[in-house]
Amino acid sequence: MSAPVITVETKQNLLQKLVVRRPEGGLSLNGKIRVPGDKSISHRALMLGALAEGETRIEGLLLGEDPRSTAKCFQAMGAEVSDLNTELVKVKGIGLGNLLEPLDVLDAGNSGTTLRLMLGILASHEGRFFSVTGDNSLRSRPMSRVVKPLQQMGAQIWGRDHNSKAPLAVCGQNLKPIHYHSPIASAQVKSCILLAGLSVEGKTTVTEPALSRDHSERMLQAFGAKLDIDAQTHSVSVNGPVQLYGQTVVVPGDISSAAFWLVAGAIVSDSELLIENVGVNPTRTGVLEALEMMGADITRENEREVAGEPVADLRVRSSKLKGCTIEGDIIPRLIDEIPVLAVAAVFAEGTTVIKDAAELRVKESDRITVMANQLNSMGARINELADGMEITGGTSLTGAELDSFTDHRIAMSLAIAALNASGSTTINRAEAASVSYPDFFDTLKAII
C-alpha cells in the first residue's frame, strides 16, 4: 500500500507538522468545496452587533481563532454572544457608547483587525479606560497607522515604541470629527476612523489613495448608519452620532480562503474544483483578476446577492499559467492573497513581478522574506524587492522541510506549493492555519 499524500504529526491533539508527499505518478484535485465564512465580514458582524440595539443574528460566521478573539473582547465589555460553534450566532448588543470598562486586559490574540478596529470604538467611549494586547506576533505589528489619526480626533492612547505597538492603553474621550487623508489604502485604517466617528458630533471623513475593501461601509449602512460615499475620490464620510440596530447577517465564503483552492486547481494537472458560495465583492476580487491575467481557467457560476454582498460559485480547471506584473491599485484588493499568488507564479511560464506590496512586511510575518526563502529552499527562483517579489517561473520544486513562521497564510500557501513538488515536504507549525481556516487540511485530504 502506498503512503498517504497527507499525514500530520500532533502533540496533545494539536497539529504540529504537516507532511505532503506527492506520488511519483502525480495527483489531481477534484470535488466541491465550501470555504469558511469571510473573516473580514465575521469581525464586523460581531463588532456592530455588540454596538447595536437589539439582537443581531449571524449565519455562517467564521469559527477561526481571529473572530473568537473579537467575540471574547466584546463579551468582556458587556455584549452577550451565543455559542460560536453553531450555524446561527446571536449577539445581544449593548448600544453604541455603552460598552463597559473591562475587568482585565482585552486580548486580540493574533488578530490585527480586532485590535485596529476596536481602537476606534474604545477611543470614543468617554470616561472609560481600556487596555489591549495580543500575541507575540500582534505585539510586534505597527498600530501607529490607526493611533495617529485617532490622536488627531483627540484620542488618548499610550503604548510601546512611541505609542505604536501593543500593549496599548486607551482612555476614552469626547472625540472631534476630522477629514483624514490616509497615506495608504487600508480597510483597517478606514474602518477604525469610521467606527470612531459613529459617536462623534459632526462629519468624519476618510480619503484613501485607492479603493480598499468596503465591507465596513456596506455593513454600517445595513445597521442604520448614513454614509456619504464618493467613489471617484475614494472618500467615505459618516455623520455622527448615529444609532445602530441589530440585523441578520449572512456571511459568504471568504475569497481569501478560496484563493488557495483556485491556485491549487490551476497548477495541479487534470484538476477541476468547484468552490461554492464565495463572496465576490469587487473590492476583494483582485485575486481573480490576477489569476485571469496569468491565464487561469476560472468561471463564475450562480451569481447572486446575499445580505448585500455579491456571491458566486467559482469553478477552476488546471491550465498553463504565464507570468505577469501585479502592481498599483489592484494590490489593496489582493494583499492577503499574494503569498499563494507567489506559488502560482512559481509554476507560470516567464517572470512575474509583484510590486507596491510593502504592507506584506508587517503582516503576521514578513511575508515577502518568508515566502521567498521557503519557496527558494524548494528550488524556486525568487528575488526579493523592497515592496514585493520577482519570480522566475517554470522551475521544478523538490520537497523540503519548511516553516510557517506561525503565519496562517504562509502555512496554507506552502501546502499548495507542496502538491506540485517532488518527494515529501514537511511544514512545521502548520497549526497556524486554524487562525482563519480550521478545516483546511481536512478539506485538502478530501479532494485528493
Image (tube, rainbow, N blue to C red):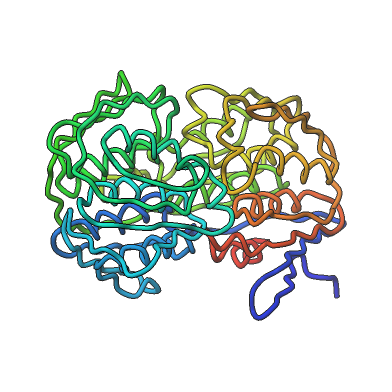
Q: Give the image location of residue 168, x and y in percent.
A: 42, 51
Q: Is residue 330 left or right of residue 447?
A: left
Q: Report how many numbered discs are placed on residues in the image.
A: 0
In the picture, the quarter occupied by the C terminus is bottom right
User: In which image quadrant can residue 424 be found?
Assistant: bottom right
Q: Give the image location of residue 193, x and y in percent.
A: 30, 38
Along the viewing direction, whichever of 445 and 417 lies nearer the viewer: 417
Along the viewing direction, whichever of 62 and 189 lies nearer the viewer: 189
Furthest-top residue in this view: 232
Residue at 41% from the left image edge and 57% from the top image edge: 132
In the picture, the quarter occupied by the N terminus is bottom right
Q: Is residue 213 left or right of residue 314?
A: left
Q: Is residue 29 left or right of residue 63?
A: right
Q: Give the image location of residue 27, x and y in percent.
A: 76, 56
Q: Give the image location of residue 164, x and y in percent.
A: 47, 42
Residue 46 versus residue 398 in the image, above or below: below
Residue 108 versus residue 256 in the image, above or below: below
Residue at 48% from the left image edge and 46% from the top image edge: 255
